Amino acid sequence: MSLFGEYPCKNESVAPIYISFTTVAVCIPLCLITVAGNLLVVLAIFIDPNKDLRAPFNYFVANLAVSDLLMGLVVDPTAIVYHVMEGVARKVPPLVYLHVPYFISCTGSVLSLAALTLDRYLAITSPLSYRTQLNPKRAGLAAAGIWTFSLSFPFIYLVTGYLTYSFVFLHTVVVVTLLVILLTYLKIFRVFKDQVRQWDSLDQTNVFNQAKRQAARWEQKVTKTFIIMLTLFLACYLPSCICIYIINLCGKVCSCNLIHWARDIPSLLILANSGVNPFVYALRFENFKKAFVKLLRNRKCCRQQNPRTVAFDNGGQLTLSSD
């Protein structure tokens, strides 16, 4: 029997204590990692300490990082408070304050991945016109469009409720976007094969051919990195989609404990996905790694220099002032 739109355990809406506190225990470290890692990505791209991160691809990476940062700064602290109250007070606050920002963040993440796919498609299939077709201004307009849709679409939740909206979200934003991404990458892989054949026929002593081959290799490395990100995204979102089906369609066959786990597991998986992307950039891209290190070192230097500045102002001796 389908329970589409109805919570199967509405008479047992409060989860067992061990489920609530297990969710909190996993959520807290993931939240800290998500905030720290994605904040570092955003700062690295917009401050750009090495002056080598200003590119349309990285702007979409920043857009994805902002979506993940919203998850860490808003959604997860709200979820922690919700589950603590559920475990301690055995009552829960209104879920709308948790679900609306959650779906805003998820929508922003999915659409940012779609934008990154478009960037890779243009970079691989039209390398000569890529910079003119997708310049920083157009990348900014695309990012603005993503956030306009991400901020407006989830408010349908206020009319439909959580379970109905989650089903709609799954079959529109997630499934349609992922199908577009997968079909696009089939085209990209075909172009990759053609490029490899062209490399074999190029004159390797020609400087222009060497530069062209090196540029193509770089674009391939960027694309392969994004494929890793997409794989991690699928690994986290597909189980979440299965959980939505369990909640909606399981009915009286499933225990309420299973339903409560199916409620909590998607948020934990998506939080884990939001936290892992910065590590992918650091491991795959030397320019991101250098930017991260420079930002962290500059912060450390600032902390060391502040007391010295005060001391020199007070007479040139290395002593701390109590001002």
Image (spheres, grey):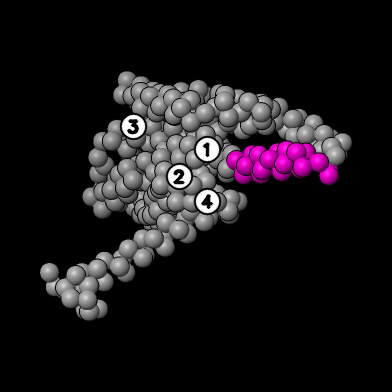
Q: Which residue is mark 3?
A: 100
Magenta region, main secondary structure: helix
Q: Reading the chain from its start, which is encountered first: label 3 or label 1? A: 1
Residues at marks 4 and 1, CA–CA distance in whole angstroms: 13 Å
Residues at marks 2 and 1, CA–CA distance in whole angstroms: 9 Å
Q: Amino acid at mark 1?
A: Ala
- Can residue 50 be seen by looking at this rendering? yes
Q: Nearer the viewer, residue 280 or 152?
A: 280
Q: Which residue is mark 2?
A: 45
Q: Which residue is mark 1?
A: 55
Q: Nearer the viewer, residue 302 or 225?
A: 302
Q: Which residue is mark 4?
A: 288
| Magenta span | 204-227
Residue drawn at point x = 50 percent, y = 22 percent: 172
Q: Is residue 218 magenta?
A: yes
Q: Residues within 10 Å of mark 1 (few under 14, many from 20)?
A: some
Q: Position of residue 87 (x, y in %)?
A: 30, 51
Q: Nearer the viewer, residue 57 or 315?
A: 315
Q: Reading the chain from its start, which is encountered first: label 4 or label 1? A: 1
Q: Mark 1 falls on what kind of element?
A: loop
Instruction: Give the foreground label among 3 and 4.
Output: 4
Instruction: Name the residue furthest left.
Output: 323
Q: Reading the chain from its start, which is encountered first: label 3 or label 2? A: 2
Q: Residues within 10 Å of mark 3 (few under 14, many from 20)?
A: many
Q: Is residue 117 above or below residue 28?
A: above
Q: Mark 4 falls on what kind of element?
A: helix
Q: Position of residue 250 (x, y in %)?
A: 49, 32
Q: Mark 2 falls on what kind of element?
A: helix
